[in-house]
Image (cartoon, helix red, strand yellow):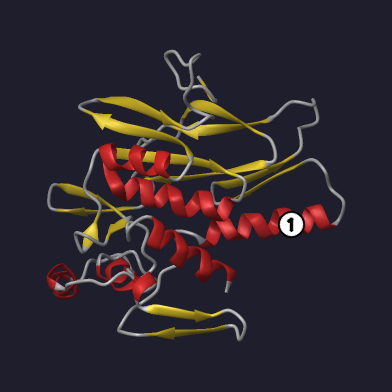
Amino acid sequence: MTVLTTALDIGERSGGLFDIGVGDLVGAWGFGAEGRTPDQARIAAGLSLRRTPAHKLVELDAAQGRARRHGAVQLDLSGIAKGFGADEMMRCLTGFGIKRALVSLDGELSARGLNEHNMPWAVGVERPDFETRDVLGVIDLTDSAVATSGDYRHWVDVGKMRLSHTMDPRLGGPMRNRVASVSVVHPLCMYADAWATACMVAGEDAGPALARQNGLSALFLLRDGGELREIGVGPMFEGPTAESRPQGARG
């Protein structure tokens, strides 16, 4: 219920840019459990459908632990579940009295306290490259979490186009903008996970505005021709001392 409540709340606050009701699109484009071959008939159906976001279709009864649908919707929680898992791992460690920890669940990370050198935990920001894995910079974390949404790890080739697994509900299919990745720092990884997806879908202009509107610290990496351009938002990544790299991310 915690995941659903948070997902629907962020769905509403993002204007539907984060939408867990895109399960049909995820499956149609080959990113679901049934395989990686795009289904042209289902894609056409998704493109033609006038969509209603999940936060307007799903009603929660937290007291009874029940959810009710007010319309046809297929839920996909992949944009928030890993962050919740990282939070739960950290909660368990904290319950055992552990005061220094860094946990990672498929790249979504939560940090508690300082590392063994009494320094913030150094977390790498991956270069958004389709072929290789390399670190672009480092974020210092203490008692906070970071989640990254990117276009470079899960994709499908359609003709000459390489399309991301991240769905844009406004398009009825994969997002198409210049944002290569968004990293969001937040006290809870579940929120960082969902907001990173929302900012990614929003795009290079609306994404930073959305992050500022919601008081987020976010690092946007944009594809600009053959180069990468950075936009930093929030106290972790912007400020009067920011120079070539946003404050909070070290190259």
Q: Please state, as top left, top right, bottom left or bottom right, where the N terminus lies in the image.
A: bottom right
227 horizontally vs 107: left or right: left
Q: The residue tagged with tag 1: helix, strand or loop?
A: helix
- Residue at 25% x, 70% y is 28
Q: x%, y% of residue 121?
A: 68, 32
Q: x%, y% of residue 120?
A: 70, 29
**Nearer-the-camera pick, 23 or 144:** 144
* Up/down of 35 relative to 97, above or below: below
The residue at the far front in this view is 213
- Residue at 77% x, 59% y is 92
Q: x%, y% of residue 3?
A: 54, 67
Amino acid residing under circle 1: Arg
* Up/down of 119 relative to 132, above or below: above
**Nearer-the-camera pick, 234 or 100:** 234
Q: How crowded is mark 1: few (under 14 residues within 10 Å), some or many (20 or more)?
A: some
- Residue at 35% x, 73% y is 56
- Can I make out residue 130 in this image? no
4 horizontally vs 244: left or right: right
204 horizontally vs 116: left or right: left
- Can I make out residue 54 in this image? yes
Q: x%, y% of residue 197?
A: 40, 51
Residue 220 image-quadrant placement: top left
The residue at which mark 1 appears reads as 91
Q: Count the labels in the image.
A: 1
- Residue at 29% x, 73% y is 24
* Up/down of 83 relative to 121, above or below: below
